[in-house]
Image (cartoon, rainbow, N blue to C red):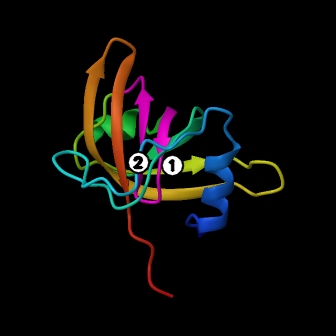
Amino acid sequence: MGALLKMPTPMRFADYANASAETGSTWQPGLTKSGAERRVFPRKEIRAQVEGKRLDHTVVACRSPQLSLSLRDLSFGGLSAMSETPLGRGERLTVFFPPLGANSGWDAYGRVLRCEPTGLGYRVAVEFDPLPAA
């Protein structure tokens, strides 16, 4: 039987988000959210490497299931990262956040909202699955 993957907890997320020297929020309280900026959770700019695994059973995903993602920003709702591999809109993946200090690593499940080519690879936006109610 496969290992049970843990979902992120608020304390671990906060520790992870605050650990980067380049941490800074692009969200400004009190401003009306309009257009593309309709985020429920504030983003934290983060520069870190995380590992991803494609969960879909497409031929492309099965041929290259492992991903290396360079985080750009992170929130409770999702992430933005750079990838060398193009991903399909709606594609399912899991992202592993490595241990940080005394905290253990954690996994998050999500789906690709968009993947846009850039000069440095592909800019990927991932929406995390909602946490189940306790």
Residue placed under numbered mark 2 in the picture: 27
Q: Position of residue 62 (x, y in %)?
A: 37, 40
Q: CA distance from mark 2 to mark 1?
A: 23 Å
Give the amino acid at mark 1. Answer: Val
Q: Which element is circle 1 on?
A: strand
The tag earlier along the polypeptide, 2 or 1, is: 2
**Which is more foreground, mark 2 or mark 1?**
2
Q: Position of residue 125 (x, y in %)?
A: 34, 41
User: Which label belongs to residue 95?
Assistant: 1
User: Which label belongs to residue 126?
Assistant: none
Give the amino acid at mark 2. Answer: Trp
Regarding residue 3, the answer to whether it shows in the image is no
Q: Position of residue 64 (x, y in %)?
A: 42, 33
Q: Residue at x 34, y 25 (%)?
A: 122
Q: Position of residue 44 (x, y in %)?
A: 51, 45
Q: Between residues 91 and 21, which one lies in front from this camera angle? A: 21
The quadrant of the image that shows the N terminus is bottom right
- Establish if 118 lies above or below 113: above
